[in-house]
Image: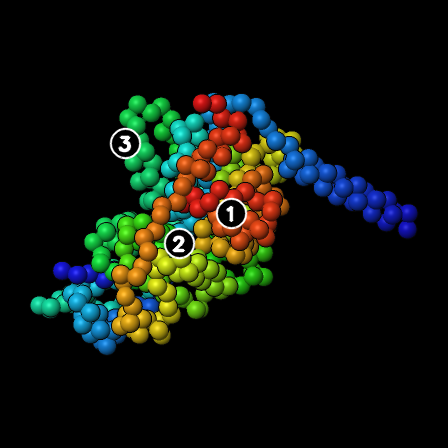
Amino acid sequence: MMCVLILAAAAGAVAAFLILRIWVVLRSRDFTPRESLSILVVAGSGGHTTEILRLLGSLSNAYSPRHYVIADADEMSANKINSFELDRADRDPNNMYTKYYIHRIPRSREVRQSWPSTVFTTLHSMWLSFPLIHQVKPDLVLCNGPGTCVPICVSALLLGILGIKKVIIVYVESVCRVETLSLSGKILFHLSDYFIVQWPALKEKYPKSVYLGRIV
Amino acid sequence: MKCVFVTVGTTSFDDLIACVSAPDSLQKIESLGYNRLILQIGRGTVVPEPFSTESFTLDVYRYKDSLKEDIGKADLVISHAGAGSCLEALEKGKPLVVVINEKLMNNHQLELAKQLHKEGHLFYCTCSTLPGLLQSMDLSTLKCYPPGQPEKFSAFLDKVVGLQK
């Protein structure tokens, strides 16, 4: 009996500590001025990639190096990223910061996959995401909703919880979402540092989000 | 040479390809003054046979690295509701018909198409209502689409991450 109580108390303490840690990590705003920062971009597939590249197109070369995560076998996204980076390098031949890397991880959800099996594939991607995030240790994670971004952002948060590095997580909800958040959005609304929506109806429903107008 | 470009994006949309390549649809498209139809069919299993006659050409392909060129030369774009294709067509100032895929899980794509339709930038329909819409729509009623402002995003981000100019 005593044993169970002690175990329960210990579990409770660990849970409380974790929650406190998550709260601290999410609340901490790192305002140290800097000249450049490494960025990890989660490019999903198809439309998600197009959208995120539009956002990246507006960012200066201070966001360097750029790491891209794509679903493996998503050659279309890989091609789009390569031509985006080539174009960028062309426009600025003297540019010192043209470094970019493409990383591949399995998709966490195929378009028609059922929800229960999604849980398992997501856990599996989590298992693969953390080593990647740990290796890259980006200053900033930018994503816009493909399933892959949940394990990536959770891994980024975990770096903070473990005290390894505070990673800034920026989530931009896809322009497709006019009135409701995507599933990734609903989860990452609570886990991101800045959550950006592109339509006024969403800003009304989620007052803590950031609304800058249509940005893609 | 007036051209219709149909795009289904990365995945597939067999119903749309089947509907638009049916003989009566082809006839309708030709009767509206178009003489070329290009189908981007993704990984679909409906693969219409390309043909070329004196008055009409049908081209079919699965993917290209960029759809820019085909969107650019089209006089009408018929697209799935994916944001990428829709925005690309609208930004090029192309008349756009979005066809909703009713078989997709949580059909959230409807939201964007509905909103942009409400703002008068495009027409939208389902596969079954596409032939009727092609017949009745008046492309001159579409409003031009103002570009998005990614520079607002970069300004915001520079500020919150503490980037020094």
Query: Which residue is farthest left?
Result: B54
Q: Distance between the residues labelled 3 and 1?
A: 32 Å
Kindly state the secondary structure of the residue where label 3 is placed: helix
Q: Distance between the residues labelled 1 and 2?
A: 15 Å
Task: State which mark lies toward you, 3 or 1.
Answer: 1
| Residue A17 x, y percent position in the rendering | 75, 38
| Residue A63 x, y percent position in the rendering | 44, 30
Q: In this view, does A82 lie to the left or right of A23?
A: left
Q: In this view, does B38 lie to the left or right of A176?
A: left
Q: Residue at x 49, y 34 (%)?
A: B157
Kindly state the secondary structure of the residue where label 1 is placed: strand
Q: Do the residues labelled 3 and 2 touch (CB within 8 Å)?
A: no
Lower position in the chain sequence, tag 3 or tag 1 = 3
| Residue B13 x, y percent position in the rendering | 36, 65
The residue wearing badge 2 is B83
Q: Is residue A54 left or right of residue A190?
A: left
Type of residue at label 3?
Asp
The residue wearing badge 3 is A90
Q: Which residue is drawn at 41% across and 40% down?
A: B150
Q: Is the same chain shared between marks 3 and 1?
A: yes
Q: Mark 3 lies on which chain?
A: A
* Image quarter hosting the C terminus of chain A: top left
Type of residue at label 2?
Ala
Q: How far apart are marks 3 and 2 (CA)?
A: 27 Å
**Can I make out residue A120 in this image?**
no
The residue wearing badge 1 is A197
Q: Mark 1 lies on which chain?
A: A
